[in-house]
Image (tube, rainbow, N blue to C red):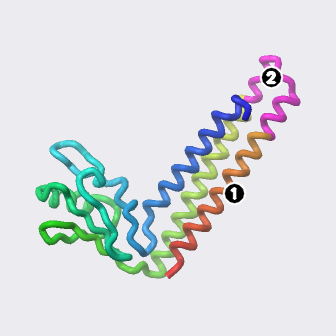
Amino acid sequence: MDARIEGFNEKMQKAYDFLLSDYQTIRAGRANPHVLDKIKVDYYGTPTPIQQVGNISVPEARMIQIAPWEKSLIKEIEKAIMMSDVGITPSNDGAVIRLVFPELTEDRRKELAKEVKKKGEDAKVAIRNIRRDGNDAFKKLAKEDVSEDEIKDLEDKLQKITDGFIKEIDAAVDSKSKEIMTV
């Protein structure tokens, strides 16, 4: 691949990867440990990812269990979960914390599907902005004695890459929407 296009391809890949990681944090009726990815626990004054202070498991389809490595962290972990946007109240038995996910209502599923579509649209806008930046950069090459045909060729290649990522995003949106709407 042309070095002049490679940088824009990498930026588009990062935008797409960000969308996929964002989708992992959206819960779809069944327990997914990734909903905890953005939660930080106050561990001796340092905000620490929840995965680094305990063992996270999914013993049942709609339950996440967190077993802290230090019993003294139970209150801190509960506080961090309550302050987050997970929307589930944790319960503990002194040794482990349990998060029980309720069944999603039809309205909540539709709301989540809309959110998924919006995030997909935002990712497409990011991809198109990267394409625009690329095209602007290619137009500046004309001042450096690069032929119009070569610039047109670069723009065409960048458009093909853009189209590919837009298709990938559409597929990801469809996949996540189906997952959410499946009861």
Q: Left or right: where does residue 21 sit relative to residue 101? A: right
Nearest to N terminus: mark 1 or mark 2? 2
Camera-side residue of 101 and 96 = 96
- For image coordinates 31% across by 59% down, the residue present is 84
Disc 1 residue type (three-letter): Lys
Q: Residue 167 carries which label?
A: 1
Q: Left or right: where does residue 153 sit relative to residue 16? A: right
Q: Which mark is residue 52?
A: none
Q: Which mark is residue 142?
A: 2
Distance, label 1 to label 2, CA atoms, is 31 Å
- For image coordinates 59% across by 67% down, the residue present is 175
Locate residue 38, reporting x and y percent: 36, 53
Camera-side residue of 122 and 75 = 75
Q: What is the residue that sits farthest to the top in this orientation?
A: 144
Q: How many marks?
A: 2
- Assign a secondary structure to mark 1: helix
Please provide the residue range marked out in magenta.
138-156
Depth check, mark 1 against mark 2: the one in front is: 1
Quarter of the rendering containing residue 63:
bottom left
Question: Which quarter of the image is occupied by the N terminus?
Answer: top right
Quarter of the rendering containing residue 26:
bottom left
Q: How crowded is mark 2: few (under 14 residues within 10 Å), some or many (20 or more)?
A: few
Against 19, residue 115 (above or below) is below
- Assign a secondary structure to mark 2: helix
